[in-house]
Image (cartoon, grey):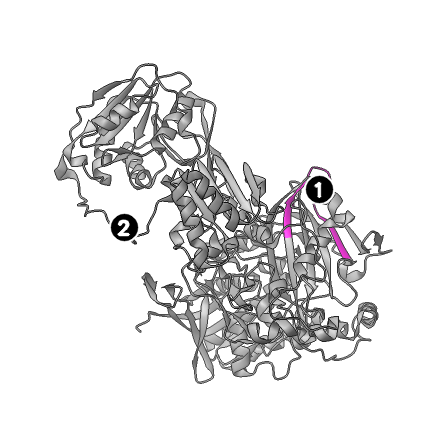
Amino acid sequence: MILVVAEQRGGKLNRASWEAIAAAQQIAAGAPVKVAVLGSGVAGVAEELAAAAVAEVVTVDAPALDTYTPDGYVLALKALVDAQAAQAVVFAHTYQTRDFAPMLAARLRRALVTDITGVKGTGADATFTRPMFQGKLAAEVKPQGPAPHLLSFQIGAFRADAVQKGSLPAAVAASGIAVDAGAIRQKPEAPFQEAKSAVDLGQAERIVAVGRGIKAQENIGVVETLARAFGAEVAASRPICDSGWLPMERQIGSSGQTVAPKLYVAIGISGAIQHVVGMKGARTIVAINKDAEAPIFEVADYGIVGDLFEIAPALAAELAK
Amino acid sequence: MEREVLEVDILIVGGGPAGMSAALRLAQLQKAKGGEPLSIAVLEKAREAGAHMMSGAVLDPSTLADLIPNFKEKGAPLAAEVSDEHMYFLTAAARLPLPFIPPPFQNHGNYVISLNKFVTWLGEQVEAEGIDFFSGFPGTEVLYDGDRVVGVRTGDKGIGKHGERKGTFEPGVDIHAKVTIFCDGVRGNLTKTLVSRLKLDDQSEPEQYAVGIKELWEIPEGRIRPGAVIHTLGYPLRPEEFGGSFIYGLPNNQVVVGLVVGLDYKDPLFEPHAAFNRLKQHALVKNLLEGGKMVRYGAKALPEGGWHTSPRVYMDGAMIAGDAGAFVNSMRLKGIHLAMRTGMLAAETAFRGVHEGDTSAARLSEYKRRIDDGPVKKELYPIRSVHQAFELGFVPFMLNAGLTMYTKGILSPLKIHAHPGHERMQVLKRYHGREGDLTTVPAASNATATDKTLAFEKLTDVHYSATAHEEDQPSHLLVQTDVCHTRCGSEYGYPCVRFCPASVYEMVDNGSGGKKLQINAANCVHCKTCDIMDPYQVITWVPPEGGGGPQYNGM
């Protein structure tokens, strides 16, 4: 059995959890997969997860898990993993997973493979591909030591819509694990955002990104309008953030964020390799650039050669219809 | 501001071949002498030993054998012994083999190495001796007591883009030493300030430089033998441009291809990186690389001027070794063994000086005497005028080089005066017969189409240097002038855009019809070309926050 640990916050499922389930289903190759979800009042999320073709959705519902703390999650997951006799425990490699998974692995004394981008083989024979040296190398690793091995999958490495859905909703069962609030050493403050514009682009389903072709800061509005029409987040290539036209946290590429949205619209971005490494995992890439030779067209699924100041407003108008 | 102060006996600045050899030699001397050990520290700006190391390279193992006689047992990473040698004169369409390999190019008994791997290994030897090796700490300032060098200040960490202190701020440390050995490499940022403050060059000729641009490739099996050494002259350079290519076979179907270009070219529109791309598109190289994969890119300046350009290398409390002191044999294309040798000699003098309680310039001048009496001068003096003759033209250069070679320097001018390379760059009007204009960045005169398989855009190459810097820090390339947007475009046509092999310099629209300089400092591969070649001499390279820079694995 493979146990997937889904992630939720405030009753909202992190969609990367579906990718983790897809990964688990591939590794399991028919063997049972269970999904666990932790929190306080997670029945709704459990129902949502039950749509997947899994043996069971297990909840760990405890008031002490209402707000995420690394201690709370490690205590709950240690108890759950001990009780479940899983062959592997699968996570999406989210910020939250990065926070608690190493401690969980140490507590369980089990191997942890992080940031996995691919899987070869199935079951106990599976080997995992993960980037090393800032993505310069891809290493194939096989976790050693007794099961269960802990596996966390890079966001975008598996497709959320590749999850096999069940014909009937899976059973939802409460684990009955209690979490002692007194054993949690962290006392989280209310969450806050560093800056008003702080954004986790890794979560965005659609991104409209702008590059140097936009020419001037006052033109950014053109892109923002299009992004609104798509319901997308605005991102940028390096020169735009360097110039301070958009904040640094919206930079995509080797010195910014790596994203894998369903749709990535690159506007006026030439497609230098430094940018492409940050977005090539997007499902559908649309590029608008006046230079037909721009390398962005090599990775684009749809390319429009032309003036972005004509095309972007026209697209926005069409979408608004 | 309160700074931590660290007191050591001997400080070595720069963990390259010179600095590592100095450190190892000190450890050996200490062992032999016994008693209370001296405290020794090595500063290195790279995150780890070897990360910023890049060279051709063919190693003459003579110094290594003196420093570590059992280097083979100790696993020195000497990739391949030189197996066969070829030298060609290239034209755009053909290659003409030279009928014989001139003696300076004969490499029998030498080894093709990756300097990155070699210095990483030297670093392991140094650390095994228990010497403090501070990687990720650049020296940013020389500390003086009057005109006596008393140590070095390391760079602050955690300074934001606009000079503000971030939450991670950590002030640099003052390291006080009885003797400081500067091994900060070609155009070393500290050596440069030493030379100007203490007038160490008042007896020297202007330094001459070149830049080497290189890629490491994985190629289909059977194309080149490990240890094969190929050098070329001619294309893609014109007779007026100094330089040539190097192609070295490595084990595991790897090959390095590189081009050395003198930083004394006349044409302001010439671009070294474009010449490198042309080299790879030449049939000789193309046949080697086609179907292969480029795995690493790098660029680094090298001192070319030789003997008479070396500054005074000793002063009160300090010495200069390696590339920083111009100890490179430009005729044999070798400097690693000389860097190691001068590092060892400096270490020996430092050790004795500290034990005798005298580290004055007079005491440390012993280092210079030993350079003069030993293999360093023996190798460098005969070729003292080879590079300088290039200013007289290609033919006099070749004649002088040939004469020097066959008379072992006896029939060679005692001293030829040559101008600093940047002064040889001509203005557009003189070279191309027309002034440039401030609103356009002209294309390189030797531009070639990039093909994404052999010839790459600079930015793509930069990606393969794996250079990385903390983004939120002040630019480490200081350009405090307005000549960029007021004069340079019409006079030289923005040559920084072309001579930088890493797309650091960019002229972007200033919003009112003109251009302004944008410095993409994070792209920098620490080659120092800009500091050397800029015709107005307004660019100063200072070290970025410690740990930043390229990651030259295998280079």
> Considering only vertical position in the picture, is A34 above or below B496?
above
Q: Which residue is mark 1?
A: B290
Q: Residue at x 38, y 44 (%)?
A: A228
Instruction: Using the image as rendered, state which of residue A147 and residue A45 is in the foreground.
Output: A45
Q: Position of residue B388 (x, y in %)?
A: 73, 74
Q: Are marks 1 and 2 in contact (CB under 8 Å)?
A: no
In this rendering, does residue B425 appear at all? no
Q: Position of residue B278 (x, y in %)?
A: 72, 54
Instruction: Using the image as rendered, state which of residue A255 and residue A285 is in the foreground.
Output: A285
In this rendering, does residue B376 appear at all? yes
Is there one chain holding both mark 1 and mark 2?
Answer: no
Q: Residue at x 73, y 51 (%)?
A: B229
Q: Position of residue B446 (x, y in %)?
A: 72, 60
Residue B216 magenta-drawn? Answer: yes
Comparing marks 1 and 2, which lies closer to the viewer? Answer: 2
Residue A264 magenta-drawn? Answer: no
**Chain assignment, label 1:** B
Residue type (three-letter) at the residue carrying disc 2? Gln
Residue type (three-letter) at the residue carrying disc 1? Glu
> Considering only vertical position in the picture, is B27 above or below B285?
below
